[in-house]
Amino acid sequence: FGPLPEEVDALLAQARLAALAAAAGVTQLVTGPKATAFTVEPSRRVGLQRRLPDNDTWRWTENRLIVPLGSDPHDPPFLERMLERMAA
């Protein structure tokens, strides 16, 4: 039947990110020109902060995990990796 249309690929990628976000307890994900912010459910923050403590790559601000833009682009594969790590 051939490859899926680009729009279908984008929709499937969005659905995968939404499912990963739900599994990780992420209620909002915002990517901007300087950083990506993952807002987590307050009840999940303590456990996530223990597993993913502040380091050179990210920092916690209340219920938000902030990942400044570094050498890696914050593209869908990056977001998937971060959400998979948070959901583990």
Image (tube, rainbow, N blue to C red):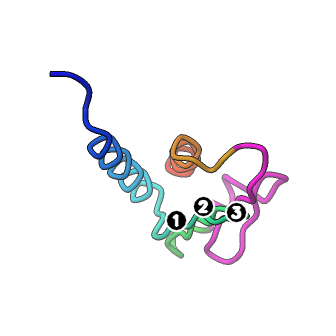
> Image quadrant of residue 81?
top right
Q: Find disc 2 in the rendering and name its residue.
A: 47
Amino acid marked by disc 1: Leu
- Where disc 2 sits, the SS reads helix
Q: Please indicate whether residue 30 sits to the left or right of residue 13 in the image.
A: right
**Residues at badges 3 and 1 in contact (C-beta under 8 Å)?**
no
Q: Position of residue 61 (x, y in %)?
A: 71, 74
Q: Find disc 1 in the rendering and name its residue.
A: 29
Alpha carbon distance from label 3 to label 1: 11 Å
Alpha carbon distance from label 2 to label 1: 19 Å
What mark, if any, has residue 35 been given in the picture? Answer: 3
Mark 2 vs 3, N-terminal side: 3
What mark, if any, has residue 71 been given in the picture? Answer: none
Residues shaded magenta: 46-72
Badge 3: how crowded within 10 Å, few (<14), some, or many (20+)?
some
Eyeballing the image, is 35 above or below 80? below
Observer-nearest of 59 and 53: 59
Observer-nearest of 78 and 19: 78
- In the displayed orientation, state which residue is furthest to the right: 56
Q: Position of residue 54 (x, y in %)?
A: 79, 59
Q: Position of residue 82 (x, y in %)?
A: 58, 48
Q: Please indicate whether residue 26 sits to the left or right of residue 34 in the image.
A: left
Amino acid marked by disc 2: Gly
- Where disc 3 sits, the SS reads strand
